[in-house]
Image (tube, rainbow, N blue to C red):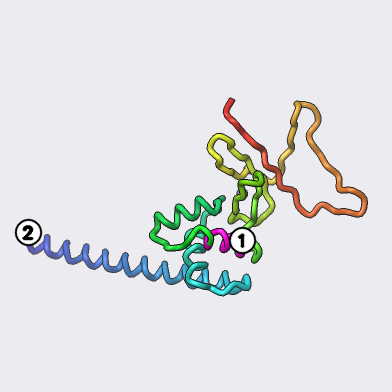
């Protein structure tokens, strides 16, 4: 009985060792991919950019503010200042890795989804959320949908709609 127990323990230890090795390997691979991503965008992969990039680009699209990402960095023992987070977010945006969504002058969000899409802004919780689907038609007063035509000599390059929501 004890022999089997010891064998089971040995196997378990072996599996645990393999898992931590796999986690280290995945982490290294992610860091390599992020280094390439930064280099391809013309950014030097500094330790700060790699640390902030690791938090931001975890495979799921998200909306962050400089403050929310700074809080997340602190929770993850990532030692960066709010100013560094702010500057890095702007550098990533200029390099095309992020898209800036200005909800109002005091509230700038950064979106890891850089394709053209629209948003709901929850005024109660300050959460920015993607509107599913590519097309939105807005009826402000229940009449005809809102539409806009480009002025003479101009063309529309992008449309970003933010629909503000509050509780009834
Ligand atoms: Zn979005």
For image coordinates 53% across by 60% down, the residue present is 83
Tally the marks. 2
For the residues carrying marks 2 and 1, which lies nearer the camera in this image? 1
In the depicted view, which residue is nearer to us: 31 or 79? Answer: 79
Q: Which residue in the protein does label 2 denote? A: 1
Q: Secondary structure at mark 2?
A: loop
Residues rendered magenta in the picture:
84-91
Q: Is residue 7 above or below residue 153?
A: below
In-image side of 9 versus 133 (left or right): left
- Beta carbon of the mark 2 residue lies under 8 A of ligand 1: no
Other residues around mark 1 within 10 Å, as few (<14) / some (14–19) / many (≥20)? some
Residue at 82% x, 52% y: name it: 156
Q: Magenta stretch: dominant SS?
A: helix
Pick the quarter of the image with the C terminus: top right
User: With respect to residue 8, does 35 lie above or below?
Assistant: below
Vertical order, 40 against 158 (above or below): below
Q: Residue at x 81, y 39 (%)?
A: 147
Measured from the top left, where is residue 37 in percent x and y? 57, 69
Task: Point out residue 59 in the picture as x, y percentages from the top left corner.
Answer: 51, 58
The mark that comes first in sequence, 2 or 1, is: 2
For residue 150, side relative to residue 124 (left or right): right
Image vertical order of residue 105 relative to residue 43, above or below = above
Q: Is residue 26 left or right of residue 126?
A: left
Q: Residues within 10 Å of mark 2 (few under 14, many from 20)?
A: few
Q: Which residue carries the number 1 mark? A: 90
Determine the residue located farthest toward the right in the rendered image: 152
The reply to whether the magenta stretch includes residue 123 is no
Could you tell me which secondary element the residue under label 1 belongs to? helix
Residue 67, horizontal then vertical, whole percent: 51, 51
Q: Quadrant of residue 23?
A: bottom left
């Amino acid at each position: 009985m004890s022999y089997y127990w010891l064998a089971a323990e040995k196997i378990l230890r072996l599996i645990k060792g393999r898992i931590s090795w796999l986690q280290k390997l995945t982490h290294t691979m992610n860091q390599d991919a992020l280094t390439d991503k930064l280099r391809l965008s013309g950014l030097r992969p500094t330790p700060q950019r790699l640390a902030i990039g690791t938090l931001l680009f975890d495979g799921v699209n998200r909306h962050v503010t400089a403050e929310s990402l700074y809080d997340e960095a602190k929770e993850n023992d990532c030692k960066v200042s709010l100013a560094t987070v702010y500057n890095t977010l702007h550098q990533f945006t200029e390099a095309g890795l992020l898209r800036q969504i200005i909800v109002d002058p005091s509230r700038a969000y950064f979106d890891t989804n850089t394709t053209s899409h629209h948003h709901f802004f929850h005024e109660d919780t300050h959460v920015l959320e993607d509107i599913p689907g590519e097309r939105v038609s807005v009826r402000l007063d229940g009449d005809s949908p809102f539409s806009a035509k480009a002025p003479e000599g101009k063309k529309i390059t992008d449309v970003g709609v933010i629909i503000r929501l509050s509780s009834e």
